Image (cartoon, grey):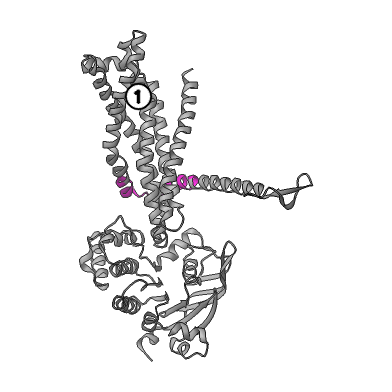
């Protein structure tokens, strides 16, 4: 049970008044302190990543390896998810459009929803799970088994070799995966349309793209770069700063997914506001 | 005088003065001073948790001490710029307790990693020759294309040692090199430490609580107790000490 009785008498040096601290206040102050420390650490980490990105030499071989790991190895998962998203979105939208007699707008609606919002966000969230947790676990276990320290003492820069390459690869690969997921989603949607109807593929795509402009496509791709950067930075930060012991590897992987998913949604919210302002 | 004694000179390659470090409220090292002479194997003995590993991590600035100075090859480690520290680290080999082999790389890639970065511009043919020669020196020429997960504990230690010596360091820091190994493999690793000292003319700090290993490799020994320097001298002298703690440790 928490002690709510004052246990420490202290002084507020700004107002010169004496204050009494309870166990609860101290606990709140401690958690606020640790929150702001984490935010500070994270900001310093981001600045270091940016600084190291623009300093030579660049670990090109490792960067390509990470592009392969993040991009190529995620293709099946992202492709299947994209196709299913397209089918589901089409089936779910049909009754609503039917009610307004606008069933012919089905390809247009699915294309806009997929390209603008659902494709980038769902792909980013899936990659946060697959890629982010992988980075957290890999770097976390390297930290626990002293491999990162071994790199440091062998006069190489682990930040450059491990972190910059992963962040760059994620930043570049996620937009490509988003485009792939969108494409698969459109094919999925065509299948969905044909479950209860008969529409040839050329007509479907001509309908779909009649409503899609570059203003739908470009902001979606731009925000995907930020989603990729978020996944890379958070995954690497959590792994790189894992504690001691094998337990911390699991914690690093888990918290990488949780934090990057949350930040993806926040970045999406900001991106939508900016796009909305630009369209007006 | 043995061959080993003849190789040792008075030049101090590492000098630690009044080193103190604490983690939170726990004081790990208190006012510790020691030195390493060129060409010698210095054994650091002490109970687990007495700060031995912390000492060598401070020497390579993997940890920042709260007080004291550390000089390596005449350079103050704590005042060195990042570039100077990088240059200094190229001359120091660090064998981690776990070996710390890079799990995602083969043995060959593990050895290429420091070689590419420290011996910049090395030709592919020279690199291959160097890797084969070093693996032969640690007796594991056949392991070239194996992954670390396919190696036994002793083999991992040997590969880790190969990865460290491949860049010809002037100073070697061994963190419990024989821990977790059977007596025969332990002896083999101890012999390797002596071979490295002779062949590569290294000066070494060996952290251990394996007395058999200490007897095989020690030119001089220091003992740390509760973060402080407790005893120093030749191992044979320490074994004859009247101090009960020292004698019980060296039994």
Which residue is painted at 46% across and 36% down in the image?
A262
**If the image is split into quadrants, where does the C terminus of chain B sit?**
bottom left
In the image, B94 versus B120, the foreground residue is B94
**If the image is split into quadrants, where does the N terminus of chain B sit?**
bottom left
Looking at the image, residue B26 sits to the left or right of residue B160; the answer is right
Q: Which residue is mark 1?
A: A114
Residue A53 falls inside the magenta stretch: yes
Chain bearing tag 1 is A
Residue B174, quarter of the rendered image: bottom left
Give the main secondary structure of the magenta stretch. Answer: helix
Residue A250 falls inside the magenta stretch: no
**Residue A11 in sight from this viewpoint:** yes
Q: Is residue B167 above or below residue A124?
A: below
Residue A10 percent across, percent down from the top left: 74, 51
Residue B5 percent across, percent down from the top left: 40, 87
Residue A134 percent across, percent down from the top left: 36, 46
Looking at the image, residue A243 sits to the left or right of residue A90; the answer is right
Find the magenta span and give its range: A46-65
Looking at the image, residue A7 sits to the left or right of residue B14; the answer is right
In the image, B195 versus A250, the foreground residue is A250
């Amino acid at each position: 049970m928490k002690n709510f009785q004052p246990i420490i008498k202290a002084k507020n040096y700004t107002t010169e008044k004496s204050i009494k601290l309870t166990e609860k206040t101290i606990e709140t102050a401690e958690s606020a302190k640790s929150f702001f420390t984490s935010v500070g650490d994270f900001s310093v980490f981001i600045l270091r990543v940016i600084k190291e990105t623009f300093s030579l030499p660049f670990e090109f071989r490792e960067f390509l390896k990470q592009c392969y790991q993040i991009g190529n190895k995620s293709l099946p998962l992202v492709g299947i998810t994209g196709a299913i998203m397209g089918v589901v979105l089409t089936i779910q939208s049909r009754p609503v459009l039917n009610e307004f007699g606008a069933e012919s707008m089905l390809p247009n609606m699915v294309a806009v929803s997929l390209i603008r919002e659902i494709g980038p966000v769902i792909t980013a969230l899936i990659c946060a799970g697959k890629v982010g947790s992988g980075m957290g676990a890999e770097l976390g276990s390297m930290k626990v088994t002293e491999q990162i320290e071994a790199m440091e003492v062998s006069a190489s820069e682990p930040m450059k070799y491990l972190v910059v390459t992963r962040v760059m690869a994620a930043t570049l690969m996620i937009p490509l995966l988003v485009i792939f997921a969108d494409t698969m989603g459109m094919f999925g949607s065509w299948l969905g349309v044909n479950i209860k109807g008969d529409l040839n593929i050329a007509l479907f795509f001509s309908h779909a793209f009649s409503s899609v402009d570059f203003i739908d496509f470009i902001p979606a791709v731009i925000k995907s770069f930020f989603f990729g950067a978020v996944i890379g930075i958070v995954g690497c930060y959590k792994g790189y700063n894992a504690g001691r012991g094998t337990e911390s590897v699991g914690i690093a992987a888990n918290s990488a997914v949780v934090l990057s998913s949350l930040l993806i949604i926040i970045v999406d919210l900001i991106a939508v506001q900016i796009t909305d302002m630009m369209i007006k | 005088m043995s061959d080993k004694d003849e190789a040792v000179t008075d030049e101090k390659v590492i000098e630690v003065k009044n080193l103190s470090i604490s983690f939170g409220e726990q004081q790990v090292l208190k006012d510790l001073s020691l030195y390493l002479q060129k060409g010698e194997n210095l054994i650091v003995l002490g109970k687990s948790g007495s700060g031995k590993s912390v000492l060598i991590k401070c020497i390579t600035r993997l940890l920042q001490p709260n007080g004291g100075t550390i000089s390596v090859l005449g350079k103050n480690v704590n005042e060195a710029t990042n570039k100077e520290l990088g240059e200094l680290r190229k001359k120091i080999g660090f064998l981690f307790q776990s070996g710390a082999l890079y799990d995602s790389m083969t043995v060959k890639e593990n050895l290429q990693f420091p070689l590419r970065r420290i011996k910049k511009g090395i030709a592919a043919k020279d690199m291959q020759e160097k890797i084969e020669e070093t693996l032969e020196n640690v007796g594991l020429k056949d392991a070239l294309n194996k992954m670390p997960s396919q190696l036994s504990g002793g083999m991992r230690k040997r590969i880790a040692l190969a990865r460290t010596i491949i860049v010809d360091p002037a100073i070697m820091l061994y963190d419990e090199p024989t821990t977790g190994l059977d007596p025969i493999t332990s002896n083999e690793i101890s012999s390797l430490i002596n071979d490295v000292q002779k062949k590569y003319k290294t000066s070494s700090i060996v952290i251990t609580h394996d007395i058999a290993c200490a007897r095989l490799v020690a030119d001089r020994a220091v003992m740390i107790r509760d973060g402080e320097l407790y005893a120093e001298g030749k191992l044979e002298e320490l074994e004859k000490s009247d101090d009960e703690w020292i004698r019980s440790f060296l039994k």
